[in-house]
Image: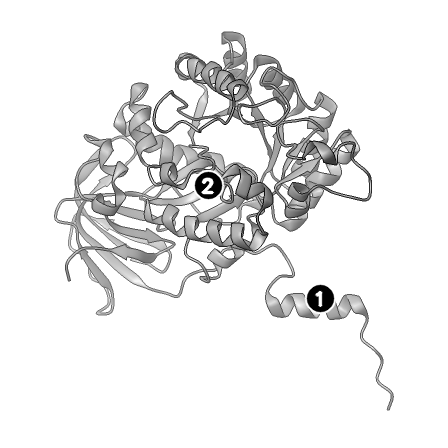
Amino acid sequence: MKLMAKPISGLLATALAALGLAAPAQAQTAAPTAAVFENVRVFDGAGLTAPMNVLVEGNRIATISAEPIQASDTATRIAGEGRTLMPGLIDAHWHTFMVRPTMAVASTAPMTLITLMAGAEAEATLLRGFTSVRDLGSPSFGLKMAIDRDVVVGPRIWPSGAMISQSGGHGDFRMLHEVPATPDRLSYPERMGMSAIADSPDEVRKRTREQLLQGASQIKLTVGGGVSSPYGPIDTVQLSVPEIRAAVEAASSWGTYVTVHAYTPEAIRNAIEGGAKVIDHGQLADEATAKLMAETGTWWSLQPFLADEMANAQPDAAGRAQAAEVRAGTDNAYRLAKKFGVKVAFGTDILFDGARAARQGAQLQTMTRWYTPAEVLKMATADNAALLALSDRRNPYPGKLGVVEVGALADLLLVDGDPTADISLLSDPAKNLLVIMKDGKIFKNSLPN
């Protein structure tokens, strides 16, 4: 009997199914486990509760009770001794592949090296207590899959994939000798998935769909210049409203949203007119623009950019001048956000400096210039979780995050002290984060047996 050859498409589908790659990877539930946090004071978004006991079963919080909790003999019992139990931290502006390498290395090194560096940084990120990150521009799809499959240790990742930029925009990382572009050759950053260049609504729509195809949970556009832009000065307005709208429509068709890199009022207004739901940065916004964000329910993903040791380094005078302009606007931006009641997210946007990334938690202390410690903690947990939920049907981790509540996903930190009184405790995670749990699994437990 002659066997019919299997169609190539069928062979591909079979191979992908065998590898678990037939669709963008979803987070895999950890093997059923149980843990009891005994005698802990729970951060509830406003302050600390009276002593409680918290039972985790599988990857969810099952019980919160002032009474002792009965659990299986195999359950891990964690003696809180009055310490603080709080949700895992969330960084709403992270670049998984741009933290450890220098800009030169990121632009020229083999992608295998950059990926291994990103994997090492992912583990370090989790051990700083950041159990979730929103990645706003990098080829992090494969790393996310490896973390979800327990191949690599790291946080939950909401990936944007390549940031979509116009020619000469903030996300255009080409070398000058690569210009003018030719249709048959993409630049190295484009081939590696760091950026995608698009110069019409149709091209923006196509690049958006390509990121969604790979598993993007949201889409990142650059609609204005930036401090670290190779070409586009910070005052430039990039991507037209029809181009922004094309990305928004494509993302909406997949049940998710568009976030934009923008600093100036005009760039922010264009983004809102085009339907974007989140403004990242925005330190140069004026009162009218902040009021518009509040009226439209637009999220403001701000970073505490100041002229301090946490500032992203700039290699030239032009970059330093633009950085100074942004830092001068930071205080005003937070003031406007509070005045008009804009929904604010916390993110760090640490680039090309692993030493500064090691102090990621110190940025929380910086935030107390404008907010109380409890307000900062809520912003970096429950509020950021609400931002992540904008991914809706593309949310890779369905379930409630950012809170210690029955039924919520078990991303938890046991802090040696009270961070609502002394938020600097989170600046030294090696010392003060005694237990780190993500998805019901314990990744660190430094309590004595």
Q: Which residue sits at x=47%, y=56%? A: 147
Q: Quadrant of residue 371?
A: top left
Residue 408 visible to the viewer: no
Q: Amino acid at mark 1?
A: Ala
Q: Amino acid at mark 2?
A: Val
The quarter of the picture where the C terminus appears is bottom left
Please provide percent x and percent y for residue 77.
20, 60
- Badge 1 marks a residue whose secondary structure is helix
Callout 2 environment at 10 Å: few (<14), some (14 to 19), or many (20+)? many
- What is the number of the mark on residue 36? none
- Badge 2 marks a residue whose secondary structure is loop
Q: Which residue is mark 2?
A: 99
Query: Vertically, is 274 above or below 349?
Result: above
Going by the picture, which residue comes out furthest to the top?
287
Going by the picture, which residue comes out furthest to the left?
81
Please provide percent x and percent y for residue 152.
44, 59
Q: How is the image coloured?
A: one colour
Residue 234 visible to the viewer: yes
Q: Which residue sits at x=27%, y=36%? A: 427
Q: Quadrant of residue 264?
A: top right
- What is the number of the mark on residue 13? 1
The quarter of the picture where the N terminus appears is bottom right
